[in-house]
Amino acid sequence: MKALAIIRTAERAAAVSIFLVMVALYFANVLARQVGGTFASEFAWVEEAVRLMSLFLVFLTVGLALEKGRHAGVHTWRDRIARATGLPLRKIVDAVGFVFCIYLVWLGYQMTAFVYGMGQKSPTLNIPVFWIYLAPTIGFALMALRFALSFFGRIDRFAGQASEEQ
Amino acid sequence: TGVWAADFVAKIGHLESAQQSRHVHLEKVAKLVNERTDGAVEFQLFPQGQLGQQREMTEGVQLGTLEATVAPAAFLGGFNPAVSIMDIPFLLPDNDETAQKIRGGAFGEALCDSFNSRGVTCIGLWPNGKKNFTSSKPLASLDDFAGQKFRVMDSNILIEQFNSLGASAIALPFGELYTALQTGVVDGEENPLDTIQRMKFYEVQKHLVLSDHGAMEDVILFNPAWWASLPEEHQKTIVDTFNEVIPDLIAHKAEAVAAALEEIKASGIDIREMSDDEKAAFRDKMYPAGRDAYVERAGEEGENLIAVYEKEYEAATAQ
Amino acid sequence: MILFALVIIVAVLLLVLGFEMFLVLGVPALMIKEFFYGNLPDPVVIQKVLGGINHTTLLAIPFFILAAELMGEGQIARRLTGLVKVLVGHLRGGMGYTTIGGSMAFGSVSGSAPATVAAMARMVYPEMRKAGFSDKFSLGLIVSSAETALLIPPSITFIIYGWMTGTSVAKLFVGGLAVGLVLGLAFAIMAALEARRSGVERGPRTSWKERVLAIRDAGWALGMPIIILGGIYSGYFTPTEAAAVSVVYAIFVEGVIFRELTLRKLFAVTERAAISTAIIFILLAMGGLLSYFITLAQVPSAITAFLEAIHAGPIMFLLIVNVSFLIAGMFIDPNSALLILVPPLYPVALALGIDPVHFGMIVTLNISIGMITPPFGLDIFVASSTLSKPVLTIISGLWPFIIANLIVLAIITYVPDISTFLPNLVFG
Ligand code: NA
Ligand code: NA
């Protein structure tokens, strides 16, 4: 589980630094506009850059959110239905979640490769657009990992949801 | 659509609203093409970005999720740096007929061809009006632009265009522009008159200069596989129909622009027409800056296209 | 039809069995893709997932969440609510009115209902509970008050409607102010009734001296709303940028002035805000996917055909408009509903002699309601993630407000003067 700890630390550090850099860039943009003139034009790439960073912010964090049991859902009846029917519902959720995420990783990879092949560039930053599709590809992989670990009982992602049963 | 399903169905997505010239003429083309192919070809239209932003739609045309899009050239620079030539200010002459000579001649052809190596099939260009400046501060002369903040679309060439005037180029989402003009986050913007009227920018601006400085050209892009699947006669019908409605489209746009100007005039804001001499002065300042930014981005391909353009421009304006 | 029923059944099953909400939306979306659009290349799924969140205006949500987390963790929130308590604490249900008024003021400038929930929820929820309001009522009021963001100007929804229909944005803004106030009044009446019913206690009346002291104590904290509201109205920044500025201000005040924000705390708070953002945005992403397939289905043409078939008059027409938006708002992102439904319905409205401004109010109020109606109600998820409350608890608190909303909608729909009186007065 040391590998997971490393991944977790990387996710947290990335999310926090991306988030704070987004704030700093936007703030700098506001200040630059007060200076005005062609200096302000130098910051025209900020909007595009921050939007790109927001995609990575989201998809580098979805896995953490899953591990902590924080994703929205109606968890009120799940365990009761599982007890009443004898179905291993938590395992079923994990399995379905894993298959869904792995499928989206596959599609994300295809989309990334396709856009990479087309060579499309972003309008102001002039960087390759395939980067934006890398974000969901990574994000769904990070969630697939958590679904798999939970399925095999290596992490308890349901602990935080216990209080939701009424 | 008739009782029988068409053999070839194309979803066509674009950004304009359903009453604007582009959509109105897409409807015309759809109807004519359907009739002329005896119902074999059907166009389904999805206006106002229902299917996503322009980048998504263009990607969709490459990928085959969307059969066609009619896109402003200004939104295509990322897919094809060569097309950004259209962002260069004062590119097309004022006279509609002269402009159509350039659009419909060797330059237009070379521009359209430049798309074909980029996973899309360009079948033609459509005119879509010209941009004008508005601002909450006076725009009485070239010098007035210095120090003002203008909102730009995502494009390095447009950024350089404003830099060349000593103005700030500010990137802002289109949806936030009305409020930004109202509160003064930016002083001004550039758009065709019918957009200025539809988006009601004149409600929150004090000055309008009829400069016609930026050509808004639409590029008609099809998915290559879908296009290749069409029998040649249908391809010809489609291309011819798109070209055939251009005079109509120009007239419709002119009417929309005239109506827009009436409405804007009635609001009482200051409107000034730029004289030919003034336009020449602006062109002298803005064209080289835009040209350099363009060549830097589009490289050798850009230089070649510029050469074709400048030759055509001279020939067309000399007569 | 059978396939469509299957999709619905699977969606309901996933929801009830406690699957994560992004799976509840995503799995049926994939089924629709396979069943009805099998020939579309599959990677379109990823494109539309990303398309749902790749918008600059959405950035206000993460920034305001972070600012709210910083203020809640530090002293700004406490000092601001302390001031409010001194000013209105002696009114029965004063905290309820504060929530409504605060959301209206904040929503006015931010223009984003989810950003308003993000910014307000953490601050006012504990205070509403302390004031004696029930858990459910507090949640319901916080989430629904944020709706006014789309109605009280400035509002991007009106700008988009104006662009689609050619209606004056200035007139729409003035009309929206009236409708937003009516909605706020309706919520205030509910807060008053609830305060009486559940015996919310009045605080002691405070002296002017205490009030002056509280204002002084609020000091730096008071700078927050002043900077956000003042900065936007005087043109220093856009609402989205204001969100980022508020984060910088919060870090400065909590870190440098109050000296309580350590680097370690900043890291923890930012991580929490990032997780809240991820939870909300993954749902927006799935919503984008679902909306795409619904757009392709060209449902609106079926609605207009139905309208023609029954020869609907204005009353019937507006009823159908409201029902269509309500249903659409339950399942797809309300802004997509705006883009899909207005083009076919607007010409019919004009032909029936309905005032464009009035129609704009009806549409925008519907869009606002769509933000809080389950199962896909963005504001519900924002509240759930920022307050760590189960989705179901929030929904159960929302029902009375949804009913109140529908009553207001009926009044706005069938009393056009409310929408048109002010714009006509101002613009003639
Ligand atoms: Na607003
Ligand atoms: Na909803």
Image (cartoon, coloured by chain):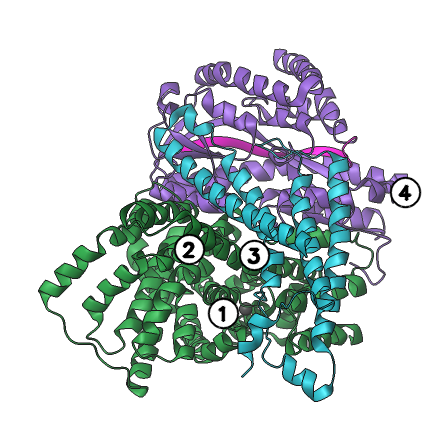
- Tell me the colour chain A is drawn in: cyan
Residue C98 drawn at (x, y percent): 29, 68
**Quarter of the image containing the N terminus of chain B?**
bottom right
Do the residues at discs 4 and 3 belong to one chain? no
The residue to which callout 1 is attached is C372
Mark 2 and mark 1: Cα distance apart in space: 16 Å
User: Do the CB atoms of the residues marked 4 and 3 lie less than 8 Å apart?
Assistant: no
Can you tell which mark lies on residue C278?
A: 3
- Tell me the colour chain C is drawn in: green
Q: Nearer the viewer, mark 2 or mark 3?
A: 3
Do the residues at discs 1 and 4 belong to one chain? no
Q: Is C91 displayed left or right of A37 in the figure?
A: left
Q: Nearer the viewer, mark 4 or mark 2?
A: 2
Where does ligand 1 appear, by image quarter?
bottom left
The residue to which callout 2 is attached is C111
Residue C139 drawn at (x, y percent): 42, 73
User: Furthest-front residue in view?
Assistant: A2
Judge whether residue C206 is colored magenta. no
CB at mark 2 closer than 8 A to ligand 1?
yes
Amino acid type shown at disc 1:
Ile
Question: Between C398 and B157, which is closer to the camera in this rendering?
Answer: C398
Q: Secondary structure at mark 3?
A: helix
The residue to which callout 4 is attached is B231
- Tell me the colour chain B is drawn in: purple
Mark 2 is surrounded, within 10 Å at the Cα level, by few (under 14), some (14 to 19) or many (20 or more) other residues, namely many
Residue occupying image coordinates x 35% and y 29%: A35
**Quarter of the image containing the C terminus of chain B?**
top right
Q: Is C185 displayed left or right of C386 in the figure?
A: left
CB at mark 1 closer than 8 A to ligand 2?
yes
